[in-house]
Image: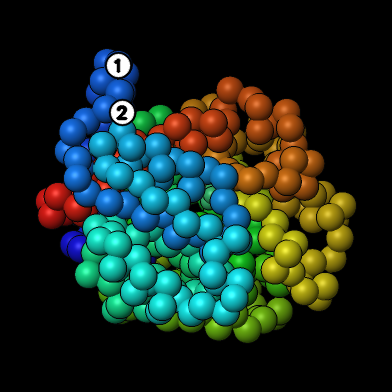
Amino acid sequence: IKHLRSAADLDAPTATLILDTAGEMAALAGREVKKLPTLRGRTVVNLFYEDSTRTRISFEAAAKRLSADVINFSAKGSSVSKGESLKDTALTLQAMGADAVVIRHPASGAPHRLAQWVDGSVINAGDGTHEHPTQALLDAYTMRSRLGRLDGLKVAIVGDVLHSRVARSNVLLLTTLGAQITLVGPPTLIPLNVAAALSAELDRGGKPKETKAELDRGGKPKETKAGTKVSYDLDSVLPDMDVVMMLRVQTERMQDSYFPSAREYSRRYGLDLARMRKLPEHAIVMHPGPMNRGMEITPEVADSSRSTIVEQVANGVSARMAVLYLLLGGKA
Ligand code: CP
């Protein structure tokens, strides 16, 4: 594949190749091989129109470890503030000879548009509420490292599914790799037609699409076409899970009607020590970060031995090295 715009760009063999390659990258780092010559002479542009800590830094680290030249572009302080369009910015990058453009943008679908304007590979580093495929890859890598498999794994994705590009990409990728997903959250943040739309997107091969999240307040939990389950009751789901992935409550994208109060949310959907003890002994707790400590997850859980949150960040560098290596090397 040339671009990574959506987790649905990846079939099972390609996704597995990326995870295996990430494993090789991690093994090399473990043997103190800090730098590989693979992308010497290639240019990777990090084009960030939205704030980021983990994704931006790990893409930069990944590209540098592969010996690529890295250009970091942040919309703040650029000619974007003078009204320059994404297309004109893209053509400028094209003129500078970008071999890959890593883009984070508040508009869903921006990476798909960008791929029409530049010759190099486009990698989606998070577009609006749509997708964040490399987060899903590093999450899948973390699950496989910790639990030894993805096929048949039971994964609960909990919280603000409505606004979560991480949830969308994880559903698409993990379903492709054989995991069973249960989306858990309040009905206003997990309308059934979001789950149905995700399933439809998977069925359609992941062509770009704005997911219209209309509310379905009366819906009963049910299984969608691609096998994604929906539940509004976290306590009943936990004892059966191998993985519980907590999502950040995205208050900046929230309308009042979606979200009763932080206290009520935490009481029903926050992961605290009492809830964590309902998980099977082997189960792990994940969060993509940044966290609202005390809202969707308590500090005791986030810092517990079951938490893979710091490990996920470290694995992000290996997963992104694998993506850059395979896309720019034409091996994926
Ligand atoms: N998980 C994630 O995308 O974090 P950042 O917003 O810090 O990149």
- What residue type is disc 1 on? Glu
Secondary structure of residue under mark 2:
helix
Ligand 1 contact, mark 2 (Cβ < 8 Å): no
Q: Earlier in the sequence, mark 1 or mark 2?
A: 2
- Disc 2 designates what residue? 26
Picture residue at 30% right of the left edge, 23% below the top: 34
In the rendered picture of this protein, how many numbered marks are placed on residues? 2
Q: Which residue is mark 1?
A: 32
The answer to whether residue 204 is left or right of residue 289 is left
In the image, is 159 to the left or to the right of 151?
right
Q: Residue at x 72, y 52 (%)?
A: 269
Q: Position of residue 49 (x, y in %)?
A: 54, 64
Residue 51: in sight, yes or no? yes
Task: Identify the residue at horizontal 73%, vertical 46% (top origin).
Answer: 292
Residue at point 65%, 57% (across, down) = 159
The numbered mark at residue 4 is none
Is 125 left or right of 188, judged from the image as shown? left
Q: Are marks 1 and 2 in contact (CB under 8 Å)?
A: no
Mark 2 Cα within 10 Å, few/some/many (few <14, many 20+)?
Answer: many
The one nearer the camera, 33 or 313, is: 33
Find the distance from the CA under tag 1 to the CA under tag 2.
10 Å
Q: Quadrant of the N terminus?
A: bottom left
Location of the C terminus by quadrant is bottom left
Depth check, mark 1 against mark 2: the one in front is 1
- 114 vs 47: above or below: below
Amino acid marked by disc 2: Ala
Q: For mark 1, does the 10 Å Cα neighbourhood hold few (<14), some (14 to 19), or many (20 or more) residues?
A: few
- Res. 171 image quadrant: bottom left
Asked if one can make out residue 138 in the rendered structure from this viewpoint, the answer is no
Q: Secondary structure at mark 1?
A: loop
